[in-house]
Every structure is written in C-alpha cells, then in structure tokens.
Amino acid sequence: MLKYEVIAADIQKSIEDGALEPNEKLPTVVELCELYGVSKITVRRAMERLVENGLVASRRGSGTFVKKPITLPENPLVTGLNERAEGFSAQHGKRNEKVTSKVYDFAVVTPPAEVAELLSLSPDDFTYYLCRTRLSENVPIAIEYTYMPLDLVPGLKRRHLYGSVYRYMREEVGLKLASFHRAIRAVPATEEEAERLDTETAAPLLELEQVGYLDSGIPFEYSRSRNVGSRYVLNNITLA
C-alpha cells in the first residue's frame, strides 16, 4: 500500500472502531504530517480518499470532521452507480424526452432540525426550499421536496427550477457533485400528491430520500423524491 492509503486505512479503522466519533474533528494537516512522518501532499491525498469513501467532510474555516451516519429510517442505503445521480433532466434527456417542471414552492427557510443536522448546518442557518413536479413528455413522473444550503448555491432563482438545478450548480456555480447517500422505500400518495402527479390517492410511489455531497465532502442537498411507481424504473449498478 502507498503511504496515503495506509493513513486513510488507519483513520478509517479508527472511525469504524469508534475511536473517532461522529462529528469529531480530525487533527490538522500539519499534525497528521508530524504523526505519520509524511508530507502535506500525502496527508491531503489520504483526506481525499476518506472524503471519497464518505467517511469525513470538510467544513469551511473549521477543519475536517467525521461524518455522522445518516439516520434515515432503517438506513437502507444504495451504493454504486445509478442514472438518477445525474439528475432527472439528464436521465430523461438522454432518451430525447422533453423534460419540464411545475414549481409549487420556492423559498428561503430555516430547515427542520433533522434536515439541518444532515446538512451539517447550525440551527440558525438558512436553506432554499423547493417543491416541484418533474414531467417527461408532459407526463408527471415525480414530485420533489428539496433543501439546499443557501451559501453553497449562490444566485439560485425560481427560473432555474424549471430546468436542471444540478446543471446550474455544475456549469454556472462550478460545483462538483460527488456522491449521494440514499434510502428507497414505497409510500402511498397523499391526496395533494395524487392530484399533482395525476394518480390515485394512496397509489404506490417510490420514494428516494437522499443527502448529496460535493467532492469536498460537504453536503449540498437533502431531498425526497416521490416517483409514480408505474412510470419510473431505477437502474442501479453495484460494483463488487
């Protein structure tokens, strides 16, 4: 193993063993250099590996912290590659389908405490909140409820919600979306959702609840997407 891999594996073991607890701050780069007798480049590569593995996250101006495990109900996380990670617009655009949106709500809010915790926010931090239905060829497929930290996505406007928010983040803001921690479950459509999705009340919906992370390990999104079961298929590839 290379030196940075040894360091990453050592810190990962400390996290898995509980020696490093969720939300605990890691030693600084300088301190890790002294501890392992390596260069800053080696330590930074080790940190990058831990971020890629979803174990730590950087907080601007504060340092690097052990991630708190996502406590979504029953925590049925899906890992691997799937097309939904590209976003709804890209997923359906590849099939040459016309993608549109109906926006029901767009506001700056103080998120619920459990959402703030998942996004590593303080109780008084603000997020965007948006609710919209995504349509393919004018057929409603999903309704999305999303929170995004206000300072991570500057300049987000209502007009962006009618297209791809992920494309705006990548191409106009310059953010790199890296990973998603996701729970998948079946839920019944509420009366309001049934009306917006043109289906029956209590009809089965496939709910994708997720936290999205940037390449720095910082969470950029908490969302729940509820998809009409008869109109949506999630394709997933899990790497061995």
Image (tube, grey):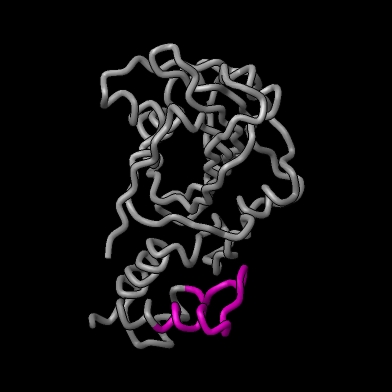
Q: Where in the figure is residue 59, as x and y percent of width and height?
A: 55, 57
Can you tell which quarter of the image residue 3 is in? bottom left
Asked if residue 180 is positioned above or below residue 138 in the image, the reply reads below
Q: Where in the figure is residue 213, as x and y percent of width and height?
A: 47, 50
Identify the magenta region. 10-28
Which residue is farthest left?
1
Q: Residue at x 57, y 40 (%)?
A: 223
Nearer the observer, 229 or 172:
229
Quadrant the N terminus occupies: bottom left
Can residue 215 be seen from the camera position used here?
Answer: yes
Nearer the observer, 134 or 165:
134
Asked if residue 67 is positioned above or below residue 216 in the image, the reply reads below
User: Does the magenta portion include 192?
Assistant: no
Q: Residue at x 52, y 38 (%)?
A: 206
Asked if residue 194 is positioned above or below residue 10 in the image, the reply reads above
Can you tell which quarter of the image residue 168 is in? top left
Which residue is farthest top?
138
